[in-house]
Amino acid sequence: MRTLRRTATILPLLLSLHLVFSAGCGSRPQKRNIVLVTFDTVRIDKIGCYGAPSSATPNIDALSREGITFRNAHCQAPITRPSHASMLTSLYPRSHGVMTNRDPFAPDIPFLPELLRRAGYATGAFTGVRLFAKGGDFDRGFDFFSSPV
């Protein structure tokens, strides 16, 4: 069950990364919108696109129908900050240095929001997790950042 929860945690990142890397493919000159939604903790059997009653998560289910749904994905760390650092850098925790929820994020490591901003994207983040408070190290690269603190 723990593996299923981890799978649901990184599913949105994998979708977003696919969109980032496929945006330059083909002949479309337009940039695609990228939306990354992460859950700190969720049971996969409570999400409609993974088998829960469709009314349980209608918005997530709609994103799944219009995008890509991964059935087999793994997180690099079973805790919030290291896992999100891995999602936003594509590095293992030992490489980006965030091993616990208290570890700072190194300013010299490229961060996905910074890379997207440099590529001309408008970036924004809305978080309900105090571990990613505004003015901290995870708000780098966002044009707009909203947090509970």
Image (spheres, rainbow, N blue to C red):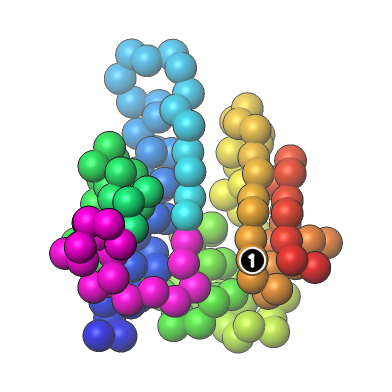
Mark 1 packing: few (<14 Cα in 10 Å), some, or many (20+)? few
Predominant SS of the magenta segment: loop
Q: In percent of the image, x 74 and y 40: which residue is there?
A: 143
x and y, in percent, of residue 73 in the image:
27, 66
Magenta highlight on residue 44: yes
The answer to whether any part of residue 14 appears in the image is no
Q: In percent of the image, x 48 and y 50: which residue is there?
A: 36
x and y, in percent, of residue 98 in the image:
61, 77
Magenta highlight on residue 17: no
The amino acid type of the residue labelled 1 equals: Gly
Residue 56: quadrant of the picture = bottom left
Q: Which residue is mark 1?
A: 128
Eyeballing the image, is 6 above or below 65? below
**Residue range of the region highlighted in magenta in the rendering:** 38-56
x and y, in percent, of residue 93 in the image:
52, 76
Mark 1, secondary structure of its residue = loop
Q: In percent of the image, x 30 and y 85: which residue is there?
A: 2
Q: Nearer the viewer, residue 82 or 144?
A: 144
